[in-house]
Image: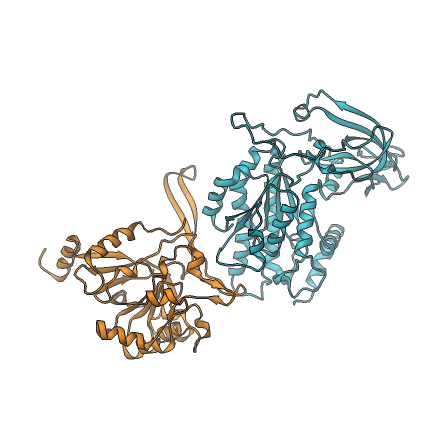
């Protein structure tokens, strides 16, 4: 094999100098789905029915039929998902250019703030401070909000719903507009069940991350996990939704390529340990 | 005086579990009239339209005047016990396993002389008794004579308990304890003396008001159960299926749409997934263990209760897709009843009219209160019926449907859309 970028990438992967980190939650019937008022149309949770298991229904093979929403589990939001993005060109899972599915990621560590305040809202100030430490957010990057929310393996704690609705962190309106209008990001990703905060219905406009990201052709990723294994900059995401005709989104496997010499917080030893952990992580049965 | 039932000692695990046997169940088609009435908790006998004779056993013609014009009419069942006997031998396996068995001859005030199972508190003849028609373990009408006035602990009588599904000292699964009915039903079962109530919980992140209260009851164990999740149903059946004596399916998905009022099939599909497929999933996973325990001692597996809706009988267009899912569930429950029959496990279908809850908010009263419905379900388990129409609306719809199904269809179609 001649010495090309790809051959060097393969060599780096084989040598363990680039690791593959899985940012995906397991698709399981127990994983919570988004909650809407009960009179509205609902997103299906993940459900699975056995077709056969080496038995009378199929003597030599095991397989299942499953059902879920386009927005179940770790999933991708296409611009057509939101009313603000409905008239954009190439706004659905089948028409988005495939080169958009491989992109660099900036990881904002909001874990301390989210632990202190479930309703934490990411601000422009926070973004500017982050940029002072890690450099300007490059156009075409994913911006991932690390909150460690995925460590809440109890679905009740993950949903965090009380009489006033859901309480999960997300960006405020100004931060979203800054990322879209001044940084030209590819999209926004979160560990919670939506890219918007749990109480984002009360922001102006309601659900600003959905409204502005999708309104300008950007994407969303939610229910991510293992963001604590990524460096602030330097990782590359592979996030390709299923090619659903006119799909508004899709569950997907999100993988991150992480260089082991990555700057700042991701020390190789910690990352190795964590990568091992990521392969055995399992949500409540 | 009936000796109050004591909690049975723990089962000896090295003994074989007794297999269910049934009392004789062959009946002529005419005699099934008695069963049809008993299924609704009524005691009816044939009454001759020409000469007024009340007759028993059921026949094709009047025993007095040979008229074929016989009507099934409700009986109050009062009469006099004229003789009694205690069976100490039988070739019927069911009775052989339950000796001694007390029987009596009762002269009903309306005329006929009948043979009845005799409650232990009936005084020696001659004495006044009340005769009731209960379904027996074979699902056929059996006549039982009770003392003319209630006595303490009379439900604990050994013979009567063979004809009822009393929750006392039994273990009950309520499949969805979060519905308005589920919450109060769990409490009612505890009050009725159930040993243990497993309260099924779907979507644990949703906490309806009043739900925390049942969690605090010492007899209640919250178990994860979402009837749309096949794996969860299978898992729970594996864990507790072999201990359940009574299963009450309260899982319900109710939206109020006809065909035109809602685009798409999502709502209808969700209704079918809970109300029809949910029942199917439960039946596939839980029924086998119930079948195996139909004669497992004093607290055997006895009943499977489906909380359906009177809309199952005839479509209520403002709740049209819900009605369709209930009709599907009713049909499936008949299959389940046939499959549980050999084990002597009774399938009780409950057909309430509109329940006073959020999904019937805009329907005018009368609506049945969840607490009343729960009381009626417990009463049904203590009685001998398998089809229960609780509340005035359900009773009214049933009567109109029995009288003329086409008329009811037209009447329901003419009701204003809320």
Picture residue at 69% right of the left edge, 41% below the top: B382
User: Along the line of sight, which residue is nearer the eye, A93 or A101?
Assistant: A101
Picture residue at 22% right of the left edge, 67% below the top: A233
Side (left or right) of A92 relative to B213: left
Q: Quadrant of residue A257?
A: bottom left
**Residue A43 image position (x, y, % from top left):** 46, 61
Side (left or right) of B186 relative to A245: right
User: Along the line of sight, which residue is nearer the eye, A170 or B411?
Assistant: A170
Chain B visual colour: cyan
User: In the figure, A83 relative to B86: above or below?
Assistant: below
Side (left or right) of B216 relative to B235: right
User: Along the line of sight, which residue is nearer the eye, B239 or B55?
Assistant: B239
**Residue B344 image position (x, y, % from top left):** 63, 34
Which of the chains is orange?
A: A
User: Residue A139: in sight, yes or no?
Assistant: no
Where does the N terminus of chain B fall, quadrant-wise?
Answer: top right
């Amino acid at each position: 094999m001649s010495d090309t970028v790809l051959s060097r990438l393969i060599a780096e992967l084989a040598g363990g100098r680039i690791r593959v980190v899985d940012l995906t939650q397991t698709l399981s019937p127990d994983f919570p789905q988004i909650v809407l008022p009960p009179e509205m149309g609902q997103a299906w949770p993940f459900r699975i029915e056995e077709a056969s298991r080496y038995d009378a229904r199929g003597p030599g093979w095991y397989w299942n039929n499953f059902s879920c929403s386009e927005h179940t589990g770790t999933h991708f939001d296409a611009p057509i998902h939101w009313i603000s993005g409905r008239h954009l060109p190439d706004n659905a899972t089948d028409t988005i250019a495939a080169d958009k599915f491989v992109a660099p990621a900036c990881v904002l560590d909001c874990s301390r703030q989210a632990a202190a305040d479930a309703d934490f809202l990411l601000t422009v100030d926070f973004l500017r401070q982050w940029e002072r430490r890690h450099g300007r957010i490059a156009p075409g990057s994913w911006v991932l909000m690390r909150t460690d929310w995925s460590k809440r393996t109890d679905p009740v704690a993950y949903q965090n719903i009380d009489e006033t609705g859901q309480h999960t962190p997300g960006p405020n309106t100004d931060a979203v507009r800054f990322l879209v209008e001044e940084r030209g990001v590819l999209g926004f990703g979160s560990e919670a069940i939506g890219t918007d905060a749990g109480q984002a219905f009360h922001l102006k406009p309601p659900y600003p991350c959905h409204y502005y990201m999708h309104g300008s052709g950007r994407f969303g990723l939610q229910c991510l996990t293992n963001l604590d294994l990524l460096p602030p900059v330097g990782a590359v995401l592979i996030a390709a939704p299923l090619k659903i005709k006119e799909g508004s989104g899709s569950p997907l496997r999100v993988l991150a390529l992480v260089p082991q010499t990555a700057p700042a917080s991701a020390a190789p030893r910690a990352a190795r340990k964590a990568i091992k952990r990521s392969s055995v992580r399992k949500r409540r049965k | 005086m009936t000796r109050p039932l004591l909690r049975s000692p723990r089962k000896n695990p090295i003994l074989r579990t007794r297999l269910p046997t049934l009392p004789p169940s062959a009946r002529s088609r005419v005699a099934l009239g008695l069963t049809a009435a008993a299924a609704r908790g009524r005691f009816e006998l044939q009454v001759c339209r020409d000469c007024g004779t009340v007759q028993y056993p059921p026949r094709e013609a009047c025993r007095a005047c040979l008229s074929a014009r016989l009507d099934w009419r409700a009986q109050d069942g009062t009469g006099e016990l004229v003789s009694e006997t205690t069976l100490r031998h039988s070739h019927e396996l069911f009775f052989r396993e339950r000796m001694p068995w007390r029987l009596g001859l009762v002269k009903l005030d309306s005329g006929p002389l009948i043979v009845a199972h005799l409650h232990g508190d009936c005084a020696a003849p001659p004495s006044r008794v009340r005769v009731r028609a209960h379904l027996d373990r074979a699902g056929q009408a059996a006549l039982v004579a009770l003392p003319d006035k209630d006595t303490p602990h009379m439900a604990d009588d050994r013979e009567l308990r063979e004809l009822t599904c009393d929750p006392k000292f039994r273990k009950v699964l309520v499949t969805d304890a979060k519905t308005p009915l589920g919450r109060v039903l769990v409490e009612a079962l505890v009050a009725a003396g159930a040993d243990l109530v497993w309260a099924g919980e779907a979507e644990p992140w949703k906490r309806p008001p009043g739900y925390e209260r049942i969690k605090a009851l010492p007899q209640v164990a919250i178990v994860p159960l979402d009837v749309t999740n096949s794996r969860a149903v299978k898992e729970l059946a594996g864990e507790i299926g072999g201990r359940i004596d009574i299963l009450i399916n309260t899982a319900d998905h109710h939206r109020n749409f006809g065909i035109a009022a809602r685009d798409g099939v999502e709502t209808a599909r969700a209704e079918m997934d809970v109300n029809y497929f949910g029942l199917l999933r439960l039946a596939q996973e839980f029924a086998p263990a119930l079948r195996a325990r139909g004669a497992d001692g004093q607290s055997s597996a006895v009943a499977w209760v489906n909380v359906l809706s009177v809309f199952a009988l005839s479509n209520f267009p403002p709740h049209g897709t819900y009605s369709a899912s209930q009709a599907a569930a009713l049909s499936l429950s008949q299959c389940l009843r046939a499959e549980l029959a050999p084990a002597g496990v009774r399938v009780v279908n409950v057909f309430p009219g509109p329940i006073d809850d959020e999904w019937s908010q805009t329907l005018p009263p009368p609506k049945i209160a969840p607490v009343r419905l729960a009381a009626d379900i417990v009463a049904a388990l203590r009685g001998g019926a398998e089809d229960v129409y609780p509340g005035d609306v359900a009773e009214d719809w049933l009567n109109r449907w029995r009288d003329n199904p086409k008329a009811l269809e037209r009447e329901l179609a003419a009701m204003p859309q809320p």
